[in-house]
Image (cartoon, grey):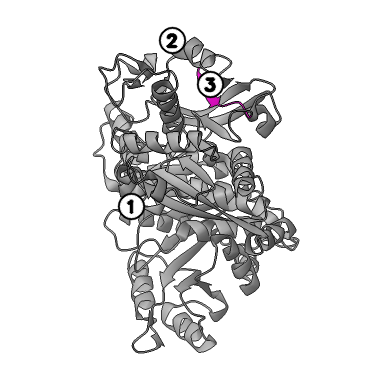
Amino acid sequence: MNTKYIFITGGVVSSLGKGILAASLAKLLKARGLRVTIQKFDPYINVDPGTLNPYEHGECYVTNDGAETDLDLGHYERFLNVATSQANNVTTGRIYKTVIDNERAGVYLGKTVQIIPHITDEIKRRMTLLGKSGNYDIVLTEIGGTVGDMESTPFIEAVRQLQWEMPDGDCLLLHLTLVPFLNAAQELKTKPTQHSVRMLQQEGLNPDIIICRTEVSLPESMKRKIALFCNVKQDSVFESRDAKSIYEVPMMLHEQGLDAIVLKKLKIKGMQEPQLDDWKEFLKNLFNPKTECDIALVGKYVELQDAYKSILESFVHAGAANHCKVRVHSIHSEHLTKDNIKEMLKGMNGILVAPGFGGRGIEGKILAVQYARENKIPFFGICLGMQIAVIEYARNVLKLEDANSTEIRPQTTNPVIDLMEEQKSLTIKGGTMRLGAYDCKIKEGTLAYKIYGSKLISERHRHRYEFNEKYAAAMEKGGLVLSGRNPDTGLVEIIELPVKQHPFFIGVQFHPELKSTVLSPQPIFVSFVKAAMKAK
């Protein structure tokens, strides 16, 4: 069977959920026994989202091979339980950089370099790269942005050319659009969808399937109207209603027969019904918790939920695994003071100090760690959160009052957290951190060993600063346990307090939230939620 390609575009407004749609459809096709992957093409000119402010674009997701990518790749991994890579996320910046580098190297033999064919040819090459590997039956491609955006035009043109070049049945176009419900008129309106599809048609593309994002169910008469005016068959119009959880979406689409019609249009026959028992079990546990707990997420980007997307989803997975509803309370670290911390963290069964960059809100995070340590509240620090735990311990237990990170206070006389040696001469920021999956060797008999049940683990990183080895002996003598190290570099990966001192206190330099999926919840999150339940 030839590799089949499914392209997903969006219309009317952004943030309709193309990533969730792509992940849900991929989940259904994979559950039928097909080899499936998803890729995201982003129209912005940044080479990757690594230098983007979290307020601008949400969290930066990191793959095993060290690619800084769009947060939608997190959805792909959480739904498919399969790792993505550098090849699964491409930006306009990356496309243009490749074409310009080729032009400088004389690849185009002196020809005038243009959007068509040079940019579109590079887009097409990237779009079919995963398919040509022979590892996949179906490659889903999500086109970022909205149809009609100036930035998206070369990608839409590339899809048009591929649709023309490929044999019938090898290429499918899904268009996600909005059917708003006007409360004042108590009416659903199809006009935005009609305009969106018309814009697509003006670019030379006609959707094969239309998915309508809607707050309420669409009557058959409405689907017939959309089909008639948008030039598709009525059985190719589906609805994507608001759901209690994003993890319901695959089931909702399957009940409408989306995966069946996709297979029919791609001329794939003889596939089994999707095996979704484990997914149904997860949803059952998610919606029928036996208990609940409250966890404070202390960070500085809390105004935007997408800034900590993977952490929030990891709590969903860990909650379901523990039959527990986890209520996450976002607390801005800039607002925490000695005077209000008791009130701000009142009733919390666990405290997580989130990752981040820069000095803003640091003192509030230090206060949160101290509060968790002294009051025996389960604590979990991630990346900067671990570094904050080290600073707090150095200041308040070892009495190194000016202990700090050189990221926050370069002139500190006790730099317990310092810039990694290879980072000191770098001036370029993008893609220069410690990125991707690295091994960690865990000491037996520690909390970390109990959590993982293994002496060697692999987790993903994204940081420039690290625990300063010069303070290791003093920290250990003072009672802090350095329970995990990189076996090659000796980099401290995990710090913790002995269980006899604290019921659950752990900080990790890596980002465990990036590997948590529906079917494989991350072990530290599962243990942290369990500790929070016990604390309650």
Compared with residue 361, is residue 498 higher up or lower down, i.e. above or below?
Answer: above
Q: Amino acid at mark 1?
A: Pro
Residue 533 lies, in percent from the top left, at 62, 49
Horizontal relation, residue 284 to residue 120: left or right? right
Q: Amino acid at mark 3?
A: Leu
Q: Residue at x 64, y 54 (%)?
A: 320
Question: What range is drawn magenta here?
Answer: 491-499
- Asked if the residue at tag 3 contacts the one at tag 1, i.e. Cβ–Cβ closer than 8 Å, the answer is no
- For the residues marked 2 and 3, what is the alpha-carbon distance in whole angstroms? 14 Å
Horizontal relation, residue 155 to residue 516: left or right? left
Instruction: Choose mark 1 or mark 3, whichever is in front.
Output: 3
Name the element at disc 2.
helix
Q: Which residue is mark 1?
A: 154
In this view of the protein, which residue sits in the foreground, 473 or 181?
A: 473
Q: Determine the image quadrant of residue 434.
A: top left
Q: Which residue is mark 3?
A: 480
Mark 1 surroundings within 10 Å by alpha-carbon count, few (fewer than 14), some (14 through 19), many (20 or more):
some
N-terminal label among 1 and 3: 1
Compared with residue 89, is residue 283 higher up or lower down, i.e. above or below?
Answer: below
Q: Which mark is residue 470?
A: 2
